[in-house]
Every structure is written in structure tokens, then in C-alpha cells.
């Protein structure tokens, strides 16, 4: 036990020391979370969930379409853009939705400040890595010979769809973050976009980040939901790693354990 406590103390010291240099100084100038060395890490989780789908891991963009081009972080205007949204060119039919809860979005003021703390580190060389999506096991037995495609589709959903549409497509805060309509033309809507300026065309042919193979993998993953238990999004807080789909095998296992206990009783 003493070794565990000592190890945790050393780890805390390393984390603090890592953020006591130029990045910590920059954060102190960039917002109310400047004294919190964990703020950039919290912000990285928020960015991974809500921002990287369009802007890439450090604002470099993911495509040539108007929603996916590179952005320049401006600390003077970034807060208001994140909180209230932005339509930089009304002619292109694409806009960034407001993300602040007070504007009908998903993020608290604390989360926005953490997000800014992360973005400030882009210019310091001490940017924390984005957390990877935690993809729960997909039971390929339900869709024979398509396990790899389903895994790829789950990864695509995690990085491109989860932030707006939630863990299982139920939506986050309508109307700007609506449910994902699993209809026969769902793939078309993802590829070509919709009439809403907040849903751009993700297909590569329109300047988006998803090629035909990626779209097909996403379509296969969405189709797998029809044979799985629907999941509720436990939170819209935006912190922590991204969570996608619990395997139905877990439900079957738990049910078997309960039945065995009842029989034993």
C-alpha cells in the first residue's frame, strides 16, 4: 500500500511539473482555469468529443469543404465563437452551431474554459494528446464476417458523429444537436448533408473527410443498432473518453447469472 501511495504522489508531481513551464504561463494568460494544470487535459476530452469531427486534432481541418477547413485559434474571439456559433460565409450554407448551454448548446462555461485552455497549448509545444474513443466490443456473431467493418464504423461514428448525435443516435440537445434518423437514406444524408447548416456533407466528393469505404463502414455500424439494445447517453457533460456501444453479449451474460442465482436459491 505504501508503494502505491508513493507512486501516486510521484505521478502527481510529474503532472504538475510538466505544466509548470511555458504552457502553464500561457494558460494563466488565457482564462480563469490558468491555475489548474489539469484544465488542458479536460479541454482535450471536450475537444475530442465535440470539435475534432470538423476541425481535426489541432484545428488543421479534415477536408476541403467549408465546414472542414483549417481554423486559426484566436484567443480574443474563440470563447464567443464556441459559445454562440459562427456563420463565416452565409453563402455556403454551413455554420458552426452555438455550443454554450445558455445558447441552446451542450457545454457549460467551465467546459468552454477548459476547451480554451487546451487550444492555447497548440502554440506552446506542450499539447496533451486527445483521448482515444473507448469502443466497447462489438459481437461480430450477429453480423457474420463483418466484424472488422463494424469496428471501423464504430471508430468513424465516435470521431465524426457522437458529439452531435450522442452515444446511440438519440441526439443531445435538439434542434441543433438532433437525433440521428436511421432511415433508408441515412447514408445519403451523411454523405451529402442536409438543409440544416449544422449538418455538413461528410462525403469526400463534397470536401468532407469520409470516403466511400468509410461511409459504408459507418452504414454497417448504424445498421447493427437494429439488433442491439438501444443505449441511453448517461451524460451530455463532454468529459472523459467517448463511449459508443455496449455488446449485447454482456446483457445475455448478466441475465444468465441472475437466472442461475435464482435457480440455486
Image (cartoon, rainbow, N blue to C red):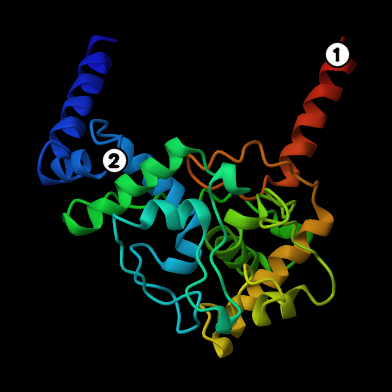
Tag 1 or tag 2, which sits nearer the N-term?
A: 2
The residue pinned by badge 1 equals 264
Which quarter shows the N terminus?
Answer: top left
Mark pair 2, 1: CA separation: 59 Å
| Residue 130 location (% of width, % of height) | 37, 52
Query: Regarding mark 1 in the picture, which secondary structure is present there?
Result: helix
The residue pinned by badge 2 equals 31
Q: Is residue 23 above or below residue 206?
A: above
In this rendering, position of residue 193 left or right of residue 20: right
Give neighbour class at mark 1: few <14, some 14-19, many 20+ (Cα, 10 Å): few
The answer, for residue 145, to whether it is visible in the render is: no
| Residue 131 location (% of width, % of height) | 41, 49
Q: Is residue 130 above or below residue 250?
A: below
| Residue 39 location (% of width, % of height) | 32, 37
State yes or no: discs 2 and 1 in contact (Cβ < 8 Å). no
Q: Which mark is residue 136?
A: none
- For the residue pair 156 and 152, the one nearer the viewer reads as 156
| Residue 104 location (% of width, % of height) | 63, 48
Give neighbour class at mark 2: few <14, some 14-19, many 20+ (Cα, 10 Å): some
Number of marks drawn = 2
Quarter where residue 193 is shown: bottom right
In this rendering, position of residue 44 left or right of residue 147: left
Identified at 82% across, 17% down, the residue is 261
Quarter where residue 7 is shown: top left
Amino acid at each position: 500500500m505504501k508503494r502505491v501511495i508513493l507512486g501516486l504522489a510521484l505521478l502527481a508531481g510529474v503532472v504538475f511539473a510538466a505544466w509548470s513551464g511555458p504552457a502553464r504561463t500561457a494558460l494563466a494568460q488565457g482564462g480563469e482555469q490558468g491555475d489548474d494544470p489539469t484544465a488542458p487535459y479536460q479541454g482535450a476530452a471536450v475537444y475530442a468529443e465535440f470539435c475534432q469531427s470538423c476541425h481535426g486534432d489541432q484545428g488543421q481541418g479534415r477536408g476541403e469543404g467549408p465546414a472542414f477547413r483549417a481554423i486559426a485559434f484566436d484567443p480574443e474571439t474563440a470563447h464567443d465563437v464556441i459559445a454562440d456559433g459562427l456563420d463565416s460565409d452565409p453563402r455556403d450554407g454551413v455554420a458552426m452551431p452555438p455550443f454554450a448551454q445558455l445558447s441552446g448548446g451542450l457545454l457549460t462555461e467551465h467546459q468552454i474554459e477548459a476547451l480554451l485552455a487546451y487550444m492555447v497549448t497548440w502554440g506552446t509545444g506542450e499539447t496533451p494528446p486527445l483521448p482515444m474513443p473507448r469502443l466497447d466490443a462489438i459481437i461480430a456473431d450477429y453480423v457474420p464476417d463483418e466484424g472488422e467493418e463494424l469496428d471501423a464504423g464504430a471508430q468513424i461514428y465516435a470521431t465524426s458523429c457522437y458529439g452531435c448525435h450522442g452515444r446511440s443516435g438519440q441526439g443531445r440537445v435538439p434542434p441543433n444537436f438532433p437525433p440521428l434518423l436511421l432511415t433508408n437514406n441515412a447514408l445519403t444524408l451523411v454523405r451529402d448533408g442536409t438543409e440544416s447548416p449544422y449538418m455538413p456533407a461528410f462525403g469526400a466528393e463534397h470536401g468532407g473527410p469520409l470516403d466511400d469505404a468509410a461511409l459504408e463502414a459507418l452504414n454497417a455500424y448504424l445498421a447493427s443498432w437494429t439488433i442491439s439494445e438501444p443505449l441511453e447517453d448517461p451524460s451530455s457533460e463532454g468529459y472523459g473518453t467517448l463511449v459508443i456501444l455496449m455488446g449485447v453479449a454482456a446483457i445475455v451474460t448478466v441475465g444468465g447469472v441472475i437466472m442461475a442465482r435464482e435457480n440455486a436459491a
